[in-house]
Amino acid sequence: MVSVILSDNATTKTKFKYGLELKENPNASTPSTNQEQSLVKIQAAALNHRDVWILKGMYGGIKLGSVLGSDAVGYVVDTQERVLINPGYGWIADERRPENLFSILGLLPLPGTLTEEPVLFDNDDIVPCPSHLSTAEAAALPLAGLTAYRALFTKGLVRKGDHVLVTGIGGGVALFALQFAVAVGAHVYVTSSSPKKIEKAIELGAEGGVNYKDENCIQELKTLLKGNLLSAIIDGAGGPLYKQYPKLMREGGIISNYGQTADVKGVNYSMSFVVKNIELRGSTMGSRKEFKEMVKFVDEKKIKPVVSRVWNGLNSNSIDEAIAMMSQGNQFGKLVIDFSQSTIPKL
């Protein structure tokens, strides 16, 4: 059984500031007598941009020897129940902020999910997996689904009938935000630099989209809105369009920002936002309570995560190809490595 371990002595082709080793994890979990924890055998794990940022040394708290991966579906060894794992640790229920030091699976001292070895998790962070999801779809859900759920509902206050803009469609969080908003009856519009991604978003329920690189994109959005105004913008990019957003938003509108990948200098928040009472709200991941609410929502609405590609088997080829595709950023949906054939439960 192997794990994907962060190393400065890489044995795979993936080499940024750090690399990866596929080997047995010397810190692998062992059965516990603690009744509040359970061993979980992971069957599939999805990648996130966070994994690439860690490899590039562009993330806080990096520790060599960590098993990478934050998303997973698996089964509880003792009961054989198929489950999802809350990717966050230390945030229980407060809507405002974590009650304790918050951390995410995939960096020590927490375990990671890219492993064939059983992993010990707190029972409170283990949630039954909706039965309508395939193995790959289930693995794709936790981190991006939780981030989107909080950004859209807790922070963005999106409800039926709202007009909502989701930026950067194609990434996991943006796609979940689109799917979740459509599921509650909101009118959704998207941005992308790819016409094909906009077309796929429309197939998923978006009412239209614009190319954010087009100098006329704001006017094109106005045309799509047909006189309506945006109640919320769910944004993971930041960038220069911010200064024009008040033209599209109703008074009291909300921008829910979960990332600023377009420009490290931040965003422009001017008096044009203030006079319209437009709020800019930061949103990061979410609580255990929100995770359970998100999984219940996905189950009730029978939402199926968008998966861009699946690799079979946890090996150097699958991890190298998946990391390379993630770093290029051309995918539409999640990237999943399915190693369920090596972790089939014994019935």
Image (cartoon, rainbow, N blue to C red):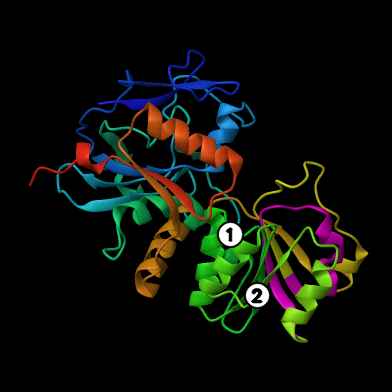
SS for dot 1: helix
Asked which quadrant contains residue 280, the reply is: bottom right
Tell me the magenta residue range: 228-253
Residue type highlighted by circle 1: Ala
Of labels 2 and 1, earlier in sequence is 1
Q: Nearer the viewer, residue 288 or 236?
A: 236
Crowding at mark 2 (Cα within 10 Å: few <14, some 14-19, many 20+): many
Q: Number of marks in the image?
A: 2
Instruction: Check if residue 160 falls in the magenta segment.
Output: no
Apparent side of residue 139 relative to residue 262 in the rendered image (left or right): left
- Residue 76: x, y in percent? 21, 45
Identify the residue under disc 2. 208
Residue 248 seen in render:
no
User: Who's the residue at 23% across and 47% down the image?
Assistant: 75
Residue highlighted by disc 1: 174
Quadrant containing the N terminus in the rendered view: top left
Q: Position of residue 207 (x, y in %)?
A: 62, 78
Tell me if 97 is positioned left or right of 335 in this view. right
In this view, the residue farthest toward the bottom is 227
Q: Is residue 189 visible?
A: yes
Q: Say left or right for 276 vs 56.
A: right
Residue 211 relative to residue 3: left or right: right
User: Looking at the image, which residue is at 50% across and 55% down?
Assistant: 333
- Residue at 58 percent of width and 59 percent of height: 174
Label 2 vs label 1: CA separation? 15 Å
Relative to residue 252, is residue 19 depicted above or below?
above
Three-letter amino acid code at the position of disc 2? Gly
Q: Quadrant of residue 307?
A: bottom left
From the top left corner, tell me how far across and down residue 162 is, in percent: 64, 80
Residue at the top extreme, as displayed: 9
Q: Nearer the viewer, mark 2 or mark 1?
A: 2
